[in-house]
Image (cartoon, grey):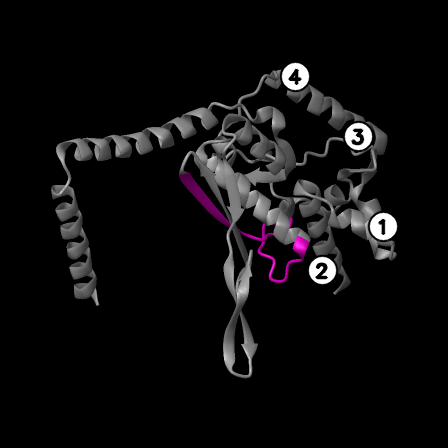
Amino acid sequence: MVADSSKALLKKEANDEKSLSKLTKDELIQKIKEQESKTEVKKSVYETLSKIDVTKYLEKAGERYDKENKKYVPLNYLPWAKAWGLVKAAYPRANYKLLEYPNYIQTKNGLELAGVLDYRITKIGCEVGATVEIEGESYTQRLYVMDQKNKPVSDPDIAQINKAQMRALVKALAIAGLGLDVYAGEDLPSNSDETSKKQAKQTARQSVNKQYNTGNIKYDGPVEGWATKDLENYPINFNGKVILLSQAFNSVQSGNQKAKEFVDSLKGVASDAYVELNKKFIAQSN
């Protein structure tokens, strides 16, 4: 098999050399110019898109724990509508398409092809993808449908699939140069003063402590290391009102459906803290 592949490759190279040898001098020069033009186009697309400041369009998706700096940092994302609008403004002819996968169904005669789908269910989840075409160049990215914990969803609904497809589109645009630093995890450019941010955060923390008398609780490190009391007193925002995590937890335990829907919508540290509080509750019950 290896020998056959090597022969095929050598044959292709020989044919390419033979084709080039038949070209006239002017045709060869033209071919070289075309190749150089393609390289320049790819370079200019990246240079153009990478210079667009996307920070003012970013939205917060939650937080993650930075083990190296031992603190939670925000997770930002670029909405697909904004991303696509920025690209179309720079390249009006740009286009994108969702990846399609063959759809096989089981019949009495075995597996038969029944068209295509814009997603693929596998043993480990649901795969989607998108390809962006800009100035004759293609950029493709694939993603798995994931939940709020970034875990693969084995049986997603159409809304989850559509969301993942649009995230794949944004990621393909990032490969082309738009907002690549968001995916690279680099520090994003900021016009805000860091001291002002810290002061605002401290003021908000003091307000919560005063309202619920949480004292000097320091919410640092992974939630797995927090005491039960700290988890119970963790402040969360419910419809513009600050409440304690224990209040939401008790409402869920009493069967309040609205409280359950609210808890399911939690993200970042709040979601992790709720899961950990629930674990401690189960452990105490056993």
Label 3 environment density (alpha carbons within 10 Å; few <14, some 14–19, many ≥20): some
| Magenta residues, start to end | 137-158
Mark 1 / mark 3, whichever is N-terminal: 3
Q: CA distance from mark 1 to mark 4?
A: 36 Å
For numbered disc 3, what is the local secondary structure?
helix
- Amino acid type, callout 4: Ser
- Amino acid type, callout 1: Lys
Mark 2 / mark 1, whichever is N-terminal: 1
For numbered disc 4, what is the local secondary structure?
helix
For residue 159, the mark is none
- Amino acid type, callout 2: Ala
Question: Mark 1 against mark 4, which lies toward the viewer?
Answer: 1
Q: CA distance from mark 2 to mark 1?
A: 25 Å
Residue 104, position in %: x, y? 52, 70
Q: Which residue is mark 4?
A: 196
Mark 1 / mark 4, whichever is N-terminal: 4
Q: Which residue is mark 3?
A: 208
Whether residue 185 appears in magenta in the rendering, the answer is no
Q: Residue at x 70, y 46 (%)?
A: 271
Give yes or no for contact between labels 2 and 4 (Cβ–Cβ under 8 Å). Answer: no
Rendered image quadrant of residue 235: top right
Q: Residue at x 75, y 25 (%)?
A: 204
Q: CA distance from mark 1 to mark 3?
A: 24 Å
Quarter containing the N terminus: bottom left
For residue 258, the mark is 1
